Image: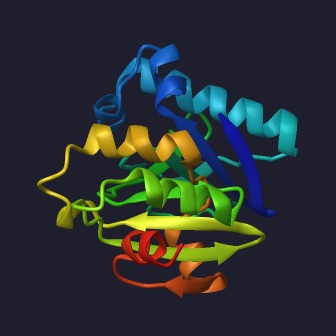
Amino acid sequence: MRLERLNYDKIKIFLTLDDLLDRGLTKEDLWRNSLKVQQLFRDMIEQASEELDFKPTQFLSVEVFSLQAQGMVVIVTTRDEVYEDDLEDDYANDYIEMQVTLDESHDMFFEFQTFEDVIQLAKTLSSSLVVESTLYSFENRFYILVDHASQEEIDLNDLIAIFAEFGSPSTTTKYRVHEYGKLLMEHNALSNIRTIF
């Protein structure tokens, strides 16, 4: 589990699939409100309090984004305002309100330390295999976004395994990289790199 402070009242928590398995959970379990899931959220908030000096209030907003190969990104926002409609007065002191938003992404988004890693990945992929991919650079790293919907003829687990040999699932969201990073190659970036290099 990796934690990152986004601003004074918002944190980002990245959970890998291994983190979930260590707690006896699957990605599907997070869509349910079980005791294990509640304990996981308590542990995350407790760890954020210790490591990031995050001060949760009574009201938390939790956004969970399921990433295809990477695991989960959880954004937790705390707020100080109390709205009359949020809780009955009788219960206001006994419970923490959590507004949970769930989203699932079917894209693969991998991070690479060097451009050479990207070249080696491109060369490893079969020349007959066309992977709809986009290449970005952001903060001295390279990112490949693969649109899973366009890869129906490819076994996703095999593709993830090949990508993992040269890079790692990104904890930075594709939206942040798209917004603040530099688009280097769009559409079939890996095929183009294999041809050029």
Residue ID at (65%, 81%): 181
Name the spot of residue 161 as percent of width and height, x first.
Answer: 41, 37
Query: Could you say which is closer to the camera, residue 135 or residue 124?
Result: 124
Query: Could you say which is closer to the camera, residue 129 or residue 173?
Result: 129
- Above or below: residue 44 compared with residue 55: above
Quadrant location of the C terminus in the rendered image: bottom right
* Left or right of residue 4, residue 75 in this image: left
Q: Is residue 22 visible?
A: yes
Name the spot of residue 191 as percent of width and height, x first.
Answer: 37, 71
- Above or below: residue 80 compared with residue 89: below
Residue ID at (19%, 50%): 154
Quadrant location of the N terminus in the rendered image: top right
Query: Could you say which is closer to the camera, residue 191 or residue 135?
Result: 191
Residue ID at (77%, 71%): 139
Residue ID at (42%, 13%): 24
Task: State the image quarter where residue 117 is shown.
Answer: bottom right
- Above or below: residue 1 compared with residue 124: above
- Above or below: residue 169 compared with residue 108: above
Name the spot of residue 153 as percent of width and height, x first.
Answer: 11, 54
Name the spot of residue 8 as percent of width and height, x first.
Answer: 81, 63
